Amino acid sequence: MNDKYSSAKREQYGQRLAAQLCDQHFGPAPTATLDGPAVLRFTPIRQVNLFVVQQLLAQWTGEMARLRSPYFDFEAPDVRQALTQFMNTLSRRIKLGRAAFEPLLARAIGDTLGVATNPQQAFEQKLLGTQPTTTAEQLRDALRYLDLDKALFQGFIDTLTPGTALERDFVLNRFRLYQEANYKAHTPLEKVVEEFSQLLPLSVGDLQDQAPAAEATKAAEAAPAVPVAVAAPPAAPEAVAPPVASAPEPTPLPTFVAPAAPAPAPVAAPPAEPEPIRRPLAEAAAPAGVPLYEKLKAEQPASAPLSETLRGERPSTTLAEKSAPKVESLREAISINQRFSFINELFNGENMEYHTAIQHLDTLPNADVAKRYVTEDLAQKYGWVRKEEHVNKLLKLLDRKFA
């Protein structure tokens, strides 16, 4: 499968579809911008939106890393807390115009098709990154940005020994063997192509390195040399149509030019958490005169420790939690990244159910009542099995609210 499909064709399709979607959204309002919730619901294909967010947060992490200086103590508690507050404030001001957003969208579309056509490469680029070693916990943390074939990748991560640093080559070889043994668990490429085709026509053949033999035969039969050969006298062999085997190969599509804002490799353990929202494919057929942004509008993202994204190799929440101030409202304390995670992992991707639960928690009188609502009512309703990590984060936020 790896050498059967063309990355150039995949990426060129991403450029074309991104341009079309941006025309629909920005055409009526060229100066319009997108905030975080709008990005998460820009297309009806959830994986595309998550890959846009992953690129955005990777750029964010890089920007914050460049802020550091050898002349100042960035590990001092008050500096760390000030950076956290700064990042929280800025996270509520995501503002993407077309020029910045379209390259991210094109890359995300190509990467989504890449997961379907080359899962080994997707595992290396989207989960493993460039680090020489990794752990099961780091891979699981990066998994939050995957929706397509998530169960397959999760199954592999579950086979790794927790808390153990693993060599990159060892993990890659293990995944190759696991993927070959579980190839039937992949989402069929035809299904993924069908989703995209509802937005912009696409077929499996459009992604292949070469046109199928049937298409080459059809092209040869349509060549002008064929009728000439039929009408020519037998003594004129030069007029006979060339055999199909010698038909020229189709001209390859131009190589994709990298977007202006490429996504760095995923940070080893970013706590940034996505908030996926599924949208029906029928939305793609919306009239061009109706701005997509009206459908994408959502409430402003709230604040919380975005400093988690600053530390690539270990969670940075420990120090922040020790000095975390009391919060008046859960809605204001939960960052956009945590919302991604809570909605995706705890509320089955349902945005409204998440907000209903958070609003109810904000009305409860004390921590005991609020925690019982989380651990009994919500846990039973949504079947929170193996969700301890996310539930604990929510409980810690309740501790801050009722401190």
Image (cartoon, grey):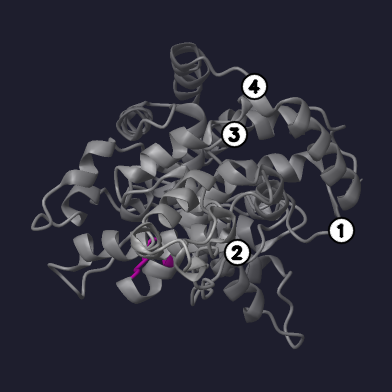
- Of tags 4 and 1, the one toward the viewer is 1
Q: Is residue 332 magenta?
A: no
How many numbered circles are shown?
4
How far apart marks 4 and 2 lie (CA) works out to 31 Å
User: Where does residue 114 sit, x and y in percent of width and height?
Assistant: 57, 50
Q: Quadrant of the N terminus?
A: top right
- Left or right for 305, reference 290: right
Kind of residue indicated by mark 4: Arg
- Identify the disc placed on residue 81: 2
Tell me if residue 321 can be seen: yes
Residues tagged 3 and 2 counted as in contact (Cβ below 8 A):
no
Kind of residue indicated by mark 3: Lys
Q: Quadrant of residue 144?
A: top right
Q: Is residue 354 above or below residue 243?
A: above
> Closest to the observer: 366 or 127?
127
Q: Secondary structure at mark 2?
A: helix
- Identify the disc placed on residue 386: 4
- Left or right for 209, reference 365: right
Residues tagged 4 and 3 counted as in contact (Cβ below 8 A):
no
> Closest to the observer: 165 or 130?
130
- Please report whichever mark, 1 or 2, sits nearer to the chain's N-terminal start: 2
Crowding at label 3, few (<14), some or many (≥20) Cα neighbours within 10 Å?
some
Q: Which residue is the site of mark 1?
A: 132
Q: Secondary structure at mark 3?
A: helix
